[in-house]
Image (cartoon, rainbow, N blue to C red):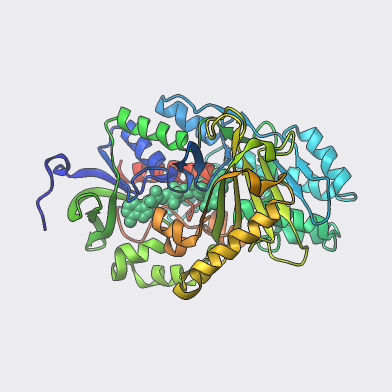
Amino acid sequence: MLPLPESQKRDCQVVVIGAGIGGLTAGALLASRGYDVLVLEQAYVPGGCASTFKRRGFTFDVGATQVAGLEPGGIHARIFETLGVEMPESIPCDPACAVYLPDEAEPIQVWRDPKRWQQERLEKFPGSERFWAKLDELFSLSWDFNQRDPLLPPTELSDFLALATKLRPNTLLTAPYALRTIANLLKDFKLDKDVRLRRFLDMQLKLYSTVEADETAALYGAVSLGLSTEPQGLFHLEGSMQVLSDRLVEALRKYNGRLLTAQMVRAVKADQGKAIGATVYDRRKDREWEVKADQIIANVPIWSLTELLGNVLPRPYRQKIDKLPDAPGAFILYLGVRADCIPEDCPLHLQFLYDYNGPIAENNSLFVSVSRPGDGRAPEGCATIIASTFTNARVWWQDESYDALKKSYAREMLTRLSTHFIDLEKHILHQESATPRTFKNFTARPFGFVGGIGQRPNQFGPFAISNRTPIENLWLVGDSTYPGEGTAGVSYSALNCVRLLENEVG
Ligand SMILES: Cc1cc2nc3c(=O)[nH]c(=O)nc-3n(C[C@H](O)[C@H](O)[C@H](O)COP(=O)(O)OP(=O)(O)OC[C@H]3O[C@@H](n4cnc5c(N)ncnc54)[C@H](O)[C@@H]3O)c2cc1C
């Protein structure tokens, strides 16, 4: 083993593997509480799925394009306040999304004003009032519970005792829905044959929970669907998504924490069931080094733990990981365009479904984000259009078909986008695409899986994956753990992890 460079000689109290929003938030919070924190990121820039890249004057958001939790009291707002750094500038998305169903010229617009959204959904989905009222009720009850910061899932006696203090009589009203799905609720209200409503819900839920109405837990679905309206809401960051991680890095450094990029953790070292350090590969210097730490926080998808620990992970935990259903992959087209091709008053986010009988994936359903004039993503008179579709990540690992598949996905997506954006192809100044392989290369996510664990009733809330791992002093944060994906979700995960770690370390 090579001796450590001078700057990296000191052992750390806490090593964080990965500078995604989950790792940076956990690292910055611990640094602000006086811990000596070192964050190691394998990429050359922090942010993971919420970072950006630049091409020919355009700035493209790699994955995440909209942010929840920036409203007063929202999770990002609370964390920035705690860390004493400025909130990134943002504007609310209104509508949060415009959803186009097959052969319909008028979209369903998810308005920010709850009354306007209520009116819209009653007009667009006649007869569904009672279903939406039930979702609103479940949202209020669940949100009320969330606001008390429950530590979920409980895995030790102390967790159960702490959780008991967060329960209120009204929390019990959610109990009958704990094991139900959104599709079960549709059936309760005799709406299971309403294909338009069902597919609208499938499209929205897939974005937030990676699974559709038949699999999404009713309580998770109610919360994620309710987040688009005031007093919560979705936000568009000024500049780019990178601002979010930049502010977290600023906070980390403010409290003397350190971030080293281009450092790939290849193995977590453990001794007698306790994590004690990591073997790191420096991509710039092409050499390995070792770091010792009292605590290790892995901001990686749960599947990566198998790679990082191998047989050190107890067998039942490895089997649990092996049994998890695959997460989806994403195919993404990044376009830098002349802005004339964008229809007037185009919302920031759109969704399209082309065939009711097709999947919410594989170009049959697209999620599209469009930049706003002056938001820092494109030169004057230009804009960025980012279109994504879910895809089976494993299909992209066959070398023989990869290039052809990538081309045909891009071609089909462009054809579909051309039905909405005016003379699109003539206006393109830059075009490139990302596949699950790109995501694996850029974010080290196994198979290029994105979005974490699907929020099914048996994997949500009390049954979610814990920040605790079976290896002492090794913690997991990010979109595999409670409460799930999204920059807001992984910020909760980081906050919970910090609370658990502090309780344990004392
Ligand atoms: C296409 C797409 C669109 C999305 N849209 C939205 C959206 O609009 N809004 C929203 O809120 N969310 C969205 N999401 C989800 C959101 O981006 C993620 O849930 C969230 O950013 C995940 O954060 P994380 O910290 O858990 O993980 P990641 O972002 O994956 O970060 C993990 C970090 O760890 C690093 N790393 C991994 N392994 C190692 C290792 N061995 N050594 C060192 N470093 C390592 C990675 O390089 C990465 O930087 C989207 C995701 C995708 C892919």
Which one is nearer the viewer's eye here, 431 or 495? Answer: 431
Q: Residue at x 38, y 41 (%)?
A: 24
Q: Position of residue 34 (x, y in %)?
A: 28, 32
Residue 66 falls in which quadrant of the image?
top right
Q: Is residue 257 left or right of residue 410?
A: left
Q: Is residue 323 above or below residue 86?
A: below
- Left or right: 86 in relation to 339: left
**Image location of residue 281, percent across then percent down:** 23, 55
Q: Position of residue 225 (x, y in %)?
A: 69, 46
The quadrant of the rendering that contains the N terminus is bottom left
The residue lying toward the viewer, choosing from 273 and 18, is 18
Quadrant containing the C terminus is top left
Q: Is residue 467 left or right of residue 453?
A: left
Give the residue at x 58% y 38%.
68
Q: Is residue 192 above or below residue 87?
A: below
Question: Taking the image as drawn, is residue 91 in sight?
Answer: yes
Query: Which quadrant holds residue 445?
Result: bottom left
Of residues 503 and 93, the one drawn nearer to the viewer in this rendering: 93
Residue drawn at x 74%, y 51% as measured from the top left: 419
Q: Is residue 59 above or below residue 438?
A: above
Q: Name the outermost residue toward the front.
A: 426
- Residue 178 can be seen in this image: no
Looking at the picture, how far across and down is residue 295, in whole percent?
28, 48
Q: Is residue 302 left or right of residue 225?
A: left
